[in-house]
Image (tube, rainbow, N blue to C red):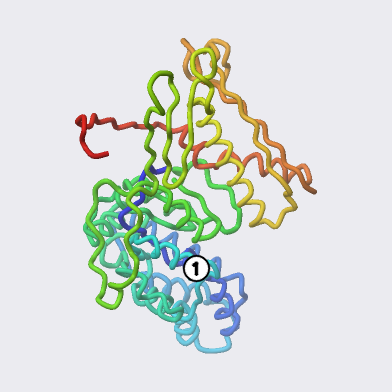
Amino acid sequence: MTSSTPAVIVCDVNETLSDMSGMKARFVQVGAPAHLASVWFAALLRDGFALAAAGGAAPFAVIGSELLREVLRDVALLRSPADAVEHIMAGFGLLKLHADVPEGVRALTSTGMRLVTLSNGSAGVARSLLAAAGLEGEFEALLSVEDAGAWKPGRPAYDYAAEACEVRPAQLLLVAVHPWDIHGAAQAGLATAWLNRGGDTYPSYFTAPDYTVGRLAELATLLAGAPASPSGNAAPEAAPEAAAEPAEADPAEGLVVVTEAGKGGYAQQITVGQHRLTADEPRPVGTDTGPSPYDLVLAGLGACTSMTVRMYAERKNWSLEKVTVTLRHSRIHATDCADCETAVGHIDHVERVLRFDGDLDKQQRQRLSEIADRCPVHRTLHSEIIVHTTVAEAGAPE
């Protein structure tokens, strides 16, 4: 999971923002079977990717139109082949947004983050899609790989987005439903968010996303709790009519401050936004006035696990009544751990027991246990973590 909010959110368009199911009706209207829509679109992506892999490119509309002529060649059409191709291609400009997109887009912009689109299709299609929903003004720019000279998931497409937004690739976060897009963006140095509306399994051979959400608004909630990006161009000045909006977020949001609670002992006062906590060591080392540091780590993992499972169960409409996560930390000898890469010394071991109350079958319980491992804190604990430390001057403002 990334440690800070991005400077710019980059949204893929086809299938991420747009509901492509409407294209099936266009095929039926020209006399072709609905299932050909999926066959044709998969072939369109295949050929676009092939060109990118070979160092070339062609416009989305050109590839799509030529492939349509081939796909429809042996179909008894209700109109001429040329008219059929034109009718189907025009359908892109008439697609609707997925139901979760308007709420999600407004939730992201309300946090003050910049939004752009980056599509393998044309910017005009993105404009029509967003304008029909009154959302075009929520995006700073509508970018197309036609200006990059290479399709996603090729690196030049993502580099082009970073240049257009005047930030480094690491300051972008790509939102997409396609694992291949997530993988390409990650390889280019971007943070990533997989929009998994269907509860699908992410392919193990692709780089895992930093965030996985079922609805776009969930991403806004996750990002709102992360510290601000430490380096990045400021967002463009707001238009005059937006000057009165309470745009600035609390600078303390997402910041954790730990100070000693008093003279003597080891008790610590923890400030997280408006919340106050206490940490301490158990007796006889400390005075046991609060959880130990390891207890707090386990609490974070447990809370994240429970939230992640709950979100998934709600999306599936499963009868999950209550989630209970029990955790314990210990240290074991590396030689006693058959699954550990380290062969010497001690290994930190966390035992996590999940309890799911509700009318759930065996397969559902198994699936929920798998989803528990997608908790962002779990992913963080299993990834390489870099802690950058500086020493502030005594008496300097905190």
Above or below 36: residue 82: below
Which residue ends up furthest to the front in the rendered image? 263
Reading the image, the residue beneath label 1 is 103
> x, y percentage for residue 81?
49, 84
Q: Horizontally, is 389 left or right of 301 in the view?
A: left
**Residue 290 appears at what percent x and percent y?**
53, 28
Q: Residue at x 32, y 46 (%)?
A: 189
Quarter of the picture containing the N terminus is top left
Whether residue 53 is visible to the viewer of this picture, yes or no, is no
Up/down of 274 relative to 122, above or below: above
Of helix, strand and loop, which one carries label 1?
Answer: helix
Going by the numbered disc 1, the residue's amino acid type is Glu
User: Based on the displayed image, in which of its 4 quarters is residue 163 positioned?
Assistant: bottom left
Front in this rendered view, residue 122 or 36: 122
Residue 139 x/y as whole percent: 34, 69
Residue visible at 43% across and 49% down in the picture: 225
Answer with left or right where residue 243 lies relative to residue 281: left
For residue 348, side relative to residue 325 (left or right):
left
Q: Nearer the viewer, residue 26 or 130?
A: 130
* Nearer the observer, 29 or 292: 292
Residue 60's image quarter? bottom left
